[in-house]
Amino acid sequence: MTVYETEVPGVGKKFEIEIGGGKRLVVLIHHDGKREVYRRPDPDADSEKLFTVSGETARKLGSIIEGAYFQPVETDEVQVPLGDAFIEWLDLHADSELAGQTLGEADLRQALGVSVLAVQRDSETYPNPGPEFELRVGDVLVTLGTREEQNALEEMLGGNGVDEGPDE
């Protein structure tokens, strides 16, 4: 990841971070401590202002992003006794072909290689659901599988048209 640093005379410093696909995140730090954050869709485009924060808020946000409050597990680097498999929690959306099917009908283990360990429905958890268990919209499936298997299941579970933020 490349970070570009530029002095902005009379203002402060500007940092640009490549975030993939030609996009950049631009942070302008003023001498008075104010921070402005912009998104540049490509190197030739104008930056779009996302937000402005004080120095104190910027430091708090930075520590959260850095992982001072919660350290996630980077699934691409984790080594567990499950080999390439890992556990994932996936939502079943209204546009899913699986809504209304039983686990036996869906046959996810045979079709994709994914095992359903449990289903969370509202406040109830159904551990080790059997083949007669019917899947419903809003269920959260707790599954075991490889990255490829989990991605294939996630596509089947629907909801793929949802905007997940500026990095789309």
Image: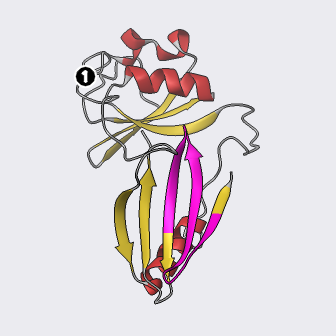
Q: Nearer the viewer, residue 80 or 117?
A: 80
The quadrant in which residue 4 appears is bottom right
Residue 68 percent location from the top left of the image: 59, 73
Badge 1 local density, few (<14 within 10 Å), some, or many (20+)?
few
Q: Does 89 appear in magenta?
A: no
Colour basis = secondary structure
x%, y% of residue 69?
Answer: 54, 72
Indicate the quadrant where residue 41 lies. Answer: top left
Residue that appears at 55% across and 40% down: 22
Instruction: Report the residue marked by disc 1.
Output: 95
Q: Which residues are magenta?
A: 5-27
Residue ID at (23%, 27%): 94
Q: Is residue 40 left or right of residue 49?
A: right
Helix, strand or loop: magenta stretch: strand
48 vs 95: above or below: below
User: Which picture quadrant has residue 85?
Assistant: top right
The quarter in which the C terminus is drawn is top left
Q: Position of residue 44 (x, y in %)?
A: 48, 44
Residue at the image position 61 percent from the left and 68 percent from the top: 6
Number of callouts = 1
Which residue is at a point 75% across and 32% down the rendered structure image? 83
What amino acid is at disc 1? Asp
Above or below, 44 relative to 7: above
Element on which disc 1 rests: loop
Give the side of residue 115 with respect to residue 38, left or right.
Answer: right
